[in-house]
Image (cartoon, rainbow, N blue to C red):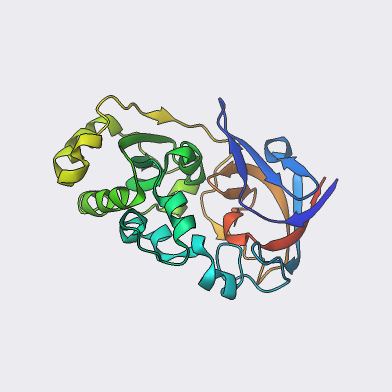
Amino acid sequence: MTYEGVLTKMQTELNDVVQYYLVFEQDFLNLNQVLDKKLSINFLKYRCLKCEKEKKVFANGVCYQCFSTSPDMGQWVIRPELSTAHLGQEDRDLDYEQQAQLQPHIVYLANSSNVKIGVTRKSQIPTRWIDQGAHEAIEVVEVPNRYLAGITEVALKEHVSDKTNWRQMLTNNLKDLDLVAIKEELRPYLPEEVKEYYLPNAQELEIKFPVLTYPSAIKTLNLGKTPFYEGILKGIKGQYLIFHDGMVFNVRKHEGFGVSLDIS
């Protein structure tokens, strides 16, 4: 069976085991049903997810021009402490920024490879945790805007990492941690203006991923350099496909790549 379309990040559904979907314009594929089957990936062409032109993607599935001008590609996306919509100050498009920034945000702890601090919109829980391959996660504070979440992350990353070791996550070299206890240990370091938003009763969420076997060593597939690959799908975790030979494919890094997929 063959599917064709432009890659976007996999859509997910939290269940006993996370369900993964590739969604194309005219079709979709439940990747859980492809486990232990041969999957071939053939790169056809680029297409910017913003302007939809056949231009090489620069980052986040968009061409350089769109990356440089789109309101959802501003610095505040990666560095939420730079958010200014709460002050009425525009970066690229104040209406968009107010809608995106002035909504509830969660600062959380996630354990993908090690415990890390992170920020996301409340509406993105638990999707954000699944995308990061976290097998356990917990909310720390819920704040009314992105700026407060950002300054909280800046304060807490002095005491806990804000990075994920993706190789460790994909080889399943993990430790179960007491996130409730770690959350309490971090509580004194919250910025003063955020302390009232602390979530004392938040509990850990455990997440199970559809992985049959984990690789002992990892190779990464880059379709820009290797436009065709074929292998047996052994697992899906975070935004990665894991194959029998240790090859891993980061779907999110390939947003904007037009591909054909063949399952046999």
Q: Nearer the viewer, residue 137 or 78?
A: 78
61 over 139 or under it: above or below: below
Residue drawn at (55%, 67%) of the image = 59
Q: Nearer the viewer, residue 43 or 26?
A: 26
Kindly tell me whether residue 178 is visible in this rendering.
Answer: no
* Residue 61 left/right relative to 41: left
- The total of numbered circles placed on residues is 0
Residue drawn at (24%, 34%) of the image = 198
* Residue 76 left/right relative to 179: right
Which quarter of the rendering shows the C terminus?
A: top right
Kindly tell me whether residue 97 is visible in this rendering.
Answer: yes
* Residue 154 left/right relative to 263: left
* Corner quadrant of residue 200: top left
Q: For the view shown, which residue lies furthest in the right direction?
A: 1
Residue drawn at (31%, 48%) of the image = 149
Coordinates of residue 143 in the picture (x, y in percent): 31, 41
245 over 211 or under it: above or below: below
Residue drawn at (35%, 34%) of the image = 138
Coordinates of residue 133 in the picture (x, y in percent): 48, 43
Coordinates of residue 107 in the picture (x, y in percent): 33, 43
